[in-house]
Image: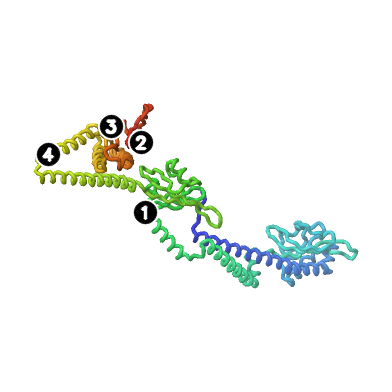
Amino acid sequence: MRIRLTLAGRFLGLQLAIVVAVLVAVAGVSLAQADARFREVEGERILSVAETAAATDAIRSGLSSPSEEGILQPAAEGLRGLADIDDLIIARTDMRAAASADPRLIGRELPRGDSPVLAGRAWVGVVTLGERRVLAAHVPVIDDGGRVIGVVAGIRDYPGPVELMAEAAPTLLVYMGIACVLGVAGSLLLSRRIKRQTLGLEPGEIAGLAEHREAMLHGIKEGVLGLDRDNRVTLVNDTAAELLGLPARPEGHRLTELDVDPQLVEVLTDQVQEPDRVAVMNDRLVTLNWTPLSTRGLRIGSVTTMRDRTDLVALRHELNITRTTTEALRAQAHEFSNRLHVISGLLSLEEYDEVERYVASVGGARARLAADVTSRVADPSVSALLIAKASLAAEQGSELRVSERTELSEQDERLSADLVTVVGNLVDNALEAVRGEGETGWVEVEVAGADAAVRPATDSEPPAPPRCHLEYRVSAAVPGAGR
């Protein structure tokens, strides 16, 4: 799993990388120059000493005559002391040392490396002498006949890294100045990069923007869900998390990893989205609006807003019922007012027998209608609706009938509310169709129930019903138009 560093961590890492790179470069350049200077300066010096020794008559005589070999050690020591070098070795043509400041080297073969000294040419290079790494200058000793009779080697112990750095101290300040310039330039470039990545915002502004974003996001009543190009959650507020049933801190995870319903995942990630798309989330009716997000011409994800419409739909159902009840009460009040006027007139005319007959007929018709509806429709909401609609039909001069084939048992609360809405709308439409036709217009309602689904009934023989269904039929008769 890839570790994502914070802005401060990335800034510190890049800054340290620049400093380390500059220091390594400075140290490398300093050591290389100190090494090159040591080889050049000390190489010329020991080469000069070796050439001087090779031209000395005493050394030439000691190498050409075995009887005079004893003068080689004093002559070598004298020259070494005057030149202030670490060692001056005199060797025969078999490269075995005949004189040296180190008695352990006498009689041992002198390391030659790739030196062409036996061919009569001088050479300066690095060799390993015993356990030491040294800078050696090989010069051939040539007799009067032009023959190589021996070798003189000037030796200078090779310094370690610390000694080389100490020798490079005079120029180290220059390189440190260069390093500082490079460091400042790198810091400026890094600062520009960070500024570009943070859109020119300072850390305090970024923190304030993040706090404001969080407060605004969680203060929105609607659900907000943000996804990146790989459908990973980038932002989510409390409402969206509750609707989707997301766990705590879902950011960075795909919806499929958060146990979201696959059908709901498909709806939220579908590239072809319709406005105000409706989906069911945990028994809640939610309206979704999906919007793609892009920056600099590249798609970076999407954001989906979610509006819970469950309470609004329920409120609309309640409003429809309330409106229907209000209209029914208004119709009944108007009907009762008319009847009271009739009764008042009959009493004024002292037609007491007629008043008694009128009251008995009105009360009987109302009671018969109520008894007829309740005997066929056991659901109280639907029966109350039909009685109220009968009063509304009577007010406009029409008639509302309940079919003899109507038979409806008491339904559950949700289906009863849906049925009240459907039947109420159909009856209203039918009453509107027969309005103005007087007593010749009538509306007949037929409702048949079978468990918990709703479908319209037809005049033909219905097909085999599904496992759960509820049939309804509303007929309106208009003179000259048939049924």
Label 2 vs label 3, nearer the camera: 2
Q: Which mark is residue 96?
A: none
| The image quarter in which residue 45 lies | bottom right
- For the point 45% across and 44% down, the residue is 267
- Work out whether residue 467 can be spotted: yes
Q: Earlier in the sequence, mark 1 or mark 2?
A: 1
Q: CA distance from mark 3 to mark 1?
A: 48 Å
Q: CA distance from mark 2 to mark 3?
A: 20 Å
Q: CA distance from mark 4 to mark 1?
A: 65 Å
Residue type for callout 3: Ser
Image side of residue 67 versus residue 212, left or right: right
Q: Earlier in the sequence, mark 3 or mark 1?
A: 1
Q: Earlier in the sequence, mark 4 or mark 2?
A: 4
Which residue carries the number 2 mark?
A: 481
Residue type for callout 2: Ala
Q: Quadrant of the C terminus?
A: top left
Q: Tag 1: Cα neighbours inside 10 Å, few (<14), some, or many (≥20)?
A: some
- Work out whether residue 12 can be spotted: no
Image side of residue 295 versus residue 395, left or right: right
> Looking at the image, which is closer to me, 421 or 154?
421
Q: Tag 3: Cα neighbours inside 10 Å, few (<14), some, or many (≥20)?
A: some
Residue type for callout 4: Glu
Which residue carries the number 1 mark?
A: 221
Counting the numbered discs, the total is 4
Q: Which mark is residue 403?
A: 3
Q: Earlier in the sequence, mark 2 or mark 3?
A: 3
Q: Are marks 4 and 3 in contact (CB under 8 Å)?
A: no
> Looking at the image, which is closer to me, 441 or 333?
441
> Looking at the image, which is closer to me, 430 or 1?
430
Q: Earlier in the sequence, mark 4 or mark 1?
A: 1
> Can you give x and y, in whole percent of width and height, for residue 165 in the image?
63, 67
Which residue carries the number 4 mark?
A: 354
